[in-house]
Structure formats: structure tokens, C-alpha cells
Amino acid sequence: MPLIVFHEKILTVIGARPQFIKASLVSRAIVRMPSLQEVLVHTGQHFEANMSAVFFSELGMQPPTYNLGIHGGGHGEMTGRMLIEIERVLQTEKPDAVLVYGDTNSTLAGALAAAKLQIPVAHVEAGLRSFNMAMPEEINRILTDRISHWLFTPTDAAKSHLENEGASPNRIAAVGDVMYDVALHYGALVDAEGRILGQLNLKPRSYVLATVHRAENTDDPKRLAAVVAALKIVATQCPVVWPLHPRTRAILDRSSQLENLSRSIHLIDPVGYLEMVQLEKFAAVVATDSGGVQKEAFFYRVPCVTLRNETEWVELVEASWNHLAPQFLQKVSVQQCCK
């Protein structure tokens, strides 16, 4: 385990809703340490009110010190603009360390900007690997791990990946999964009454929750068509609730699938975090391409189907709690899950 030096000023870079959720508990712990000061930078990667501002208010987070307002464009354009603006913030704030979470463009931009200014980087959720280099997230993970000073791993597998890649043992800290702490904390605040279940007239354990946002699904017309077709079949046996990511909604709209799809599936806008926790906690099955939702389903003991060919959370597949979509379709019907 590395020697952890408690610095006076930590600059945290976040930009996407999973990062807001993780930071809500970590930042709360930082506040309790009088020797530490946190400067929160929101890149703006997720900027819509129901994917950004609602999380700060609902999770009791302080507003970010900086909101860079950077979103849209291709991966290179977005990451490059973030890199420029984060570097300016770092030169102004002169932090002792930079903290990043996960595998988004915001993560990579924050780590790169800090490393080039010789500011040590701490990476939460280090060592995760899907071994699919076609995924932008996999590239972001690998590069961030390579240039981070502290590698905080959530699982034994993540620690092994880093060791196999030659990371020095004194850089690795097996700290466990912050998302488990999050699930315990916020899951205790949610029961089966009220909130989104009441609005949608759904009963616990009677519906499938779907989320689809990764480029490998949304940007491939054949894969997206297959996901849509599968969810429509599921909806003939069990209600399907699908909070639509803005980019996914736009793609479905451009391909003239939205109207027809809305006749068989509950298509809703992205929801606040506590509403999402309720949807996850009381679903019969979760079908998702999100890494975070896979874990939350496991924490709430809900079977999960991952709409990908592989996952960075291999432990969940090995435990037979999570099934990759092709394997699941061969083994079990949704009707069995929604009994």
C-alpha cells in the first residue's frame, strides 16, 4: 500500500453523473478533515439540469467552484477543450493533488492536465479493464492509470490488472468500492412508496429497468436496432422502463424510432439519483450498458443483463449475478425473471 500524504488542497475533477454520485460521499469525508481543502471542478460533460444540477442539490453537494461548461463535439474536441480549461484552473489554484474518478473524458483531461504540470494524480476506480480498446472508456482508464501517482482499486481483479501491467506496488491502494458506500447510504433513504414508481404505476419486482448510453450501442445502428428489438419483445412479457440519455433520445428520434417505441415501453427523461435508486432497487431485472448501474444492481440484489459483449466488472459475471447479453438470452427468459 502506498504512503498516502494528506495534502492541503485537493482539486477534484468531475463531469458525469456517476462521478457526482461518487464525489458526494468522498467530498463529504474531505470536508470532515480540517487539514484539507477541496476545490471542485465540473467540466460540464453532463450539463442538462436532470443530469447535473439536480445531483448537486439532491445529494447535498456544494456547487462546484468552477463550471467549465464544456460538452458536445467529438471525443478529441471535448477532451482537448477540457485539457485547456483545466490547465488554466490548475495554474490558478496550484493544488497539491488532483483527484479523478472513473473513465470519462473529464477523467482523462483532468489527469493529463495535472501530470503535465507535475501535480500528482489520484485515480479512484483504477485498474478496471474490459480489454476492448474500441471503447473510449477503456482508453481513458489505461492512460489515466499510467500517469496517476495513487491508484485506488475497487476490487482484487483491478489490483491484479495493474500489477500485471507493471504498476509499482507502492502506487496501488486496495481501498474497496466507493459505489458500495454510496449504495448503502442512499439505498437506505429509498423505499417502495412514492417517487417514480408511483408516477409510473409500477409495482416492485414487476418491471425491467433499461439504460443505454454507450457509444458501442448508440453509434452502431445494427446494435441499437438489436437492443430496441429485444426490449420491445421483453415489453410484451413485462413492463420496461427506459430513462433515455439525451444522446440516445436524439439518435432514436433521427432514426424515426421514438414514436413507435413509446407505444410499448415507458420512455422517460433522465431522473434524479434517488429516483434512479428506487427504479434499480425494486426492479425485477436491470438491462444496461452502464458500468455503475451494473454494480448498483448487484448491491441491491437485482439480476442484471449487461448489453455489451464484455464488462470491466468481471466479478459480477463470475458470480452469475450479472449476465452478458448473448449468454443471458441463451440461458433464461425474461418471463422467468418477472414472475
Image (tube, grey):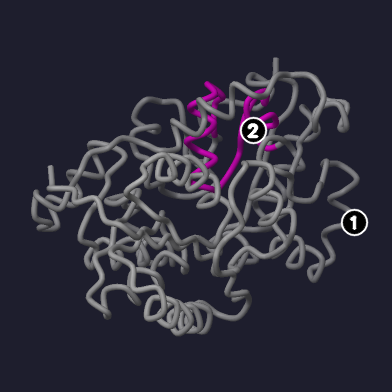
Figure check: 262 above or below 329 = below
> Which residue is located at x 63 percent, y 51 percent?
212
* Circles 1 and 2 in contact, beta carbons < 8 Å: no
Q: Nearer the viewer, residue 284 or 325?
A: 284
Q: For mark 1, give the secondary structure.
A: helix
Q: Quadrant of residue 193?
A: top right
Query: Label 1: which residue?
Result: 259
Q: Is residue 286 magenta?
A: yes
- Under mark 2, the amino acid is Val
Give the mark nearest the N terminus, 1 or 2: 1
Residue 218 x, y percent position in the rendering: 62, 62
Q: Is residue 293 magenta?
A: yes
Find residue 277 and name its label: 2
Q: How many marks?
A: 2
Figure check: 17 above or below 242 = below
Q: Nearer the viewer, residue 331 or 284?
A: 284
Figure check: 229 above or below 52 = above
Q: Nearer the viewer, residue 321 or 235?
A: 321
> Which residue is located at x 47 percent, y 41 percent?
28
- Under mark 1, the amino acid is Glu
Does residue 151 appear left or right of residue 32 in this picture? left
Marks 1 and 2, Cα distance to the nearest angstrom?
A: 27 Å
